[in-house]
Amino acid sequence: MASRIMKGTVVSTKMNKTVVVQVEFSKVHPVYGRRYKMHTKLKAHYEGSDLSVGDMVTIQEVAPISKSKNWIIKADRKAKVTPSATIPEGKVTPSATIPEAKVKETK
């Protein structure tokens, strides 16, 4: 029997030697014929610590490792980090126009 191979996105790395991978797939409605998206979260075994949330990975089904872990990480691709938007010089930011709160002094 051939083992299944799926691609997904890492959604959690909080467990030791385990990552949670979300796999998305589409189905066709049996009556209306319309496609709709579904997803499932699978726990995969990973000894390394260099994965982070948002990374794309390829997982392969193996014999059960624990009660809920039947997958291992075969390959990973790091998520592209996009630089945050910067404000050009000379522009006024919204936080600069907010007046500071005045505190009344009591006698």
Image (cartoon, rainbow, N blue to C red):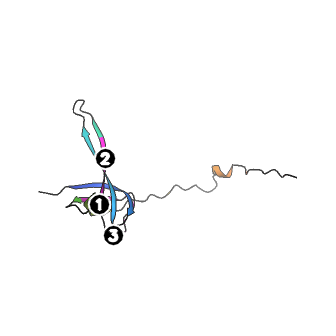
> The residue under label 2 is which amino acid type?
His
Residue 35 picture quarter: top left
User: What residue sits 30% from the left and 43% below the top?
Assistant: 38
Give coordinates of residue 16: x percent, y percent. Answer: 36, 66
Magenta residue span? 37-59
Q: Is 40 part of what is drawn in magenta? A: yes
Q: Secondary structure at mark 2?
A: strand
Left or right: residue 105 versus residue 2 is right
Q: Secondary structure at mark 3?
A: loop
- Within 10 Å of disc 2 (Cα), the crowding (few <14, some 14-19, many 20+) is few
Q: Which residue is mark 1?
A: 44
Q: Which residue is mark 3?
A: 48
Give coordinates of residue 64: x percent, y percent. Answer: 22, 61
Q: Which residue is mark 2?
A: 39
User: What residue sits 30% from the left and 58% below the top?
Assistant: 43
> The residue under label 1 is which amino acid type?
Ala
Left or right: residue 104 versus residue 91 is right
Residue at the limit of the structure toward the bottom, as seen here: 48
Q: CA distance from mark 1 to mark 3?
A: 12 Å
